Image (cartoon, rainbow, N blue to C red):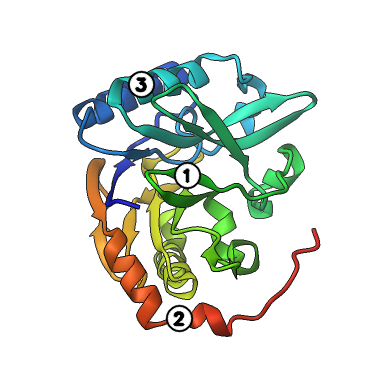
Amino acid sequence: MRDLRVSLVQGDTRWHDPAGNRDYYAGLVAPLAGQTDLVLLPETFTSGFSNEALASAETMDGPTVAWLREQAARLGAVVTGSVQVREGEGVYNRMLWATPEGGLRWYDKRHLFRMAREHERYAAGRDAITVELAGWRIRPLVCYDLRFPVFIRNRFEAGRFDYDLLLFVANWPAARRHAWRTLLRARAIENLAYVAGVNRVGTDGNGFAYSGDSAALDFLGMDLADLDDQAQVRTVVLSAEALAGHRERFPAQLDADRFTLLD
């Protein structure tokens, strides 16, 4: 592992405007070319968090997947964020992971936000994925997943952690900002890992306000970046040496409970 540069892209996503959002976020990330390793966009960054956007969900052959690949190649960095993707009869809230070399992986949001009836309209993912970048093992997750620590638990088996960095992309309303801020820090502390979470700002088409509060946190839950409620881009450097040192000095993983996730 080497040190990893992570860029938090906190934007004011346009409502139901995929083309406009692609142009908007392209402008925000353009200065990052050659300056970062990983670019993190918000949840549903082409439309906002909307059940009505299902009708215009793209396929994996659509313009947003192509756009992500183009951005990754141009920036020389991985670009990730979630969009609505239609596959078969279902639409997934899919977090895409595009690499500069043209590779593409994805994670489908497992925990669907029933308070907004997401579970009635979207298909649920099942399994977490782990991606690798510059020697780092990284776990990408989406919004409501943050509330479920068993699914997220960083297990230590055969002398190796599941991951070194947790990523969360979100449309987390300002009314629940205390939970967002608190749970991000809890996930970092309990899992002995870095955490980066990106939320949107502004007000969406349903009238919900978003306060941003995007953050990058170290393994102690301490702020490396703590953004306010304005659209902005912030890049932080994650120290591989500091992480290894903390895990050696404070090996709580050796006392963790073993378990199997059944479904």
Residue under the point 26% across and 24% down: 27
Q: Residue at x 51, y 21 (%)?
A: 65
- Regarding mark 3 in the picture, which secondary structure is present there? helix
Viewer-closest of 71 and 9? 71
Depth order, front residue of 137/23:
137
Residue 73 tag number: 3
Q: Toward the viewer: 45 or 193? A: 193
Q: Secondary structure at mark 1?
A: strand
Mark 1 / mark 2, whichever is N-terminal? 1
Task: Give the spatial CA distance, label 3 vs label 1.
Answer: 17 Å
Residue 86, image x and y in percent? 68, 25
Q: Position of residue 192 (x, y in %)?
A: 44, 71
Q: Is residue 20 left or right of residue 63?
A: left
Q: Earlier in the sequence, mark 3 or mark 1?
A: 3
Q: What amino acid is labelled 3 in the image? A: Ala
Image coords of residue 133 (percent x, y): 41, 43
Q: Which residue is mark 1?
A: 132
Q: Nearer the viewer, mark 2 or mark 3?
A: 2
Q: Please give the label number shown on residue 251.
A: 2
Q: CA distance from mark 1 to mark 2?
A: 23 Å
The crowding category of the residue bearing disc 1, from other C-alpha atoms within 10 Å (few below 14, some 14 to 19, many at least 20), is: few
